[in-house]
Each structure stands twice: as structure tokens, then as C-alpha cells.
Image: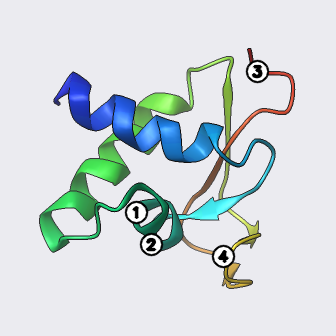
Amino acid sequence: MSAAFDNHALAALRAHPGAWHCLPCWARAAGLSAPEDMGRFRVLARRLRFSRDHELTRAGSCDRCGTVVKDDVLVREGVGAR
């Protein structure tokens, strides 16, 4: 994984701390919505489950588009991050 990609993707979460993002909204917020980027977001999301600064859940609704997620992941920068 590219550190530049990770930094750019994480900056999109930092811009909206505490807001849950479905993967498509996270990609749009980062301006990286090419089909191959979605796989990179999934890999990054899996790595973030070990982060103290980010949270993941497998059920809930996206704060950006309102989509209810049941079988995918939602990610956000933790409110207490930084």
C-alpha cells in the first residue's frame, strides 16, 4: 500500500471527525473513487481495526449518504483522536 494513498484517504476522515463513512462515501470524500481504489480502501479499513484513532463497525448507517450498512464496513476517525 502506498503511504501517499493512506495519508490522502485518512485526511478525508480527519475532515469529518466522528462521522461514519461507508466505503463509497469515504472514497468520494477523498476524491479517489476509481474501481481499483475501492479495493485499496477495503485493505486500509481492515488495517484500521487495529488503530486507536479510528473506529470500524459492520452495521449502522453512513452519516454522509444515510445508507444502512449491514454486511460491509463503516469507518470514522474517533472523536477522541489527536
Q: Residues within 10 Å of mark 4 (few under 14, many from 20)?
A: few
Residue corresponding to mark 3: 81
- Dots 2, 4 in contact, CB < 8 A: no
Amino acid under disc 1? Ala
Label 3 or label 2, whichever comes before in sequence order: 2
The correct choice, above or below, for 28 with respect to 4 in the image is: below
Q: Which residue is mark 1?
A: 27
Q: Give the distance between the C-alpha atoms of the residues marked 2 and 4, in whole angstroms.
A: 14 Å
Instruction: Evaluate if marks 4 and 3 touch, with contact meaning CB atoms under 8 Å apart.
Output: no
Asked if disc 1 and disc 2 are in contact, CB closer than 8 Å, the reply is yes
Q: Position of residue 81 (x, y in %)?
A: 76, 21
Disc 4: which residue: 70
Q: CA distance from mark 1 to mark 2?
A: 5 Å
Q: CA distance from mark 3 to mark 2?
A: 23 Å
- Please state the horizontal and vertical placement of residue 32, each as a whole percent of the image: 28, 61
Measure the alpha-carbon separation of dots 1 and 3. Answer: 21 Å
The earlier-in-sequence mark between 2 and 4 is 2
Q: Amino acid at mark 3?
A: Ala
Mark identifier at residue 62? none
Above/below status of 70 relative to 45: below
Which residue is drawn at the image coordinates 16% and 29% (left, top)? Answer: 2
Q: Residues within 10 Å of mark 1 (few under 14, many from 20)?
A: many
Measure the alpha-carbon separation of dots 1 and 4. Answer: 19 Å
How does the figure colour the protein chain or chains? rainbow
Q: Residue at x 44, y 72 (%)?
A: 24
Which amino acid, mark 4? Lys
Task: Please indicate whether residue 79 sits to the left or right of residue 48 in the image.
Answer: right
Q: x, y percentage for residue 57?
A: 69, 52
Q: Helix, strand, or loop for circle 1?
A: helix
Residue 73 in percent (x, y) is at 56, 60
In primary-sequence order, the first of circles 1 and 3 is 1
Q: Label 2, on which residue?
A: 24
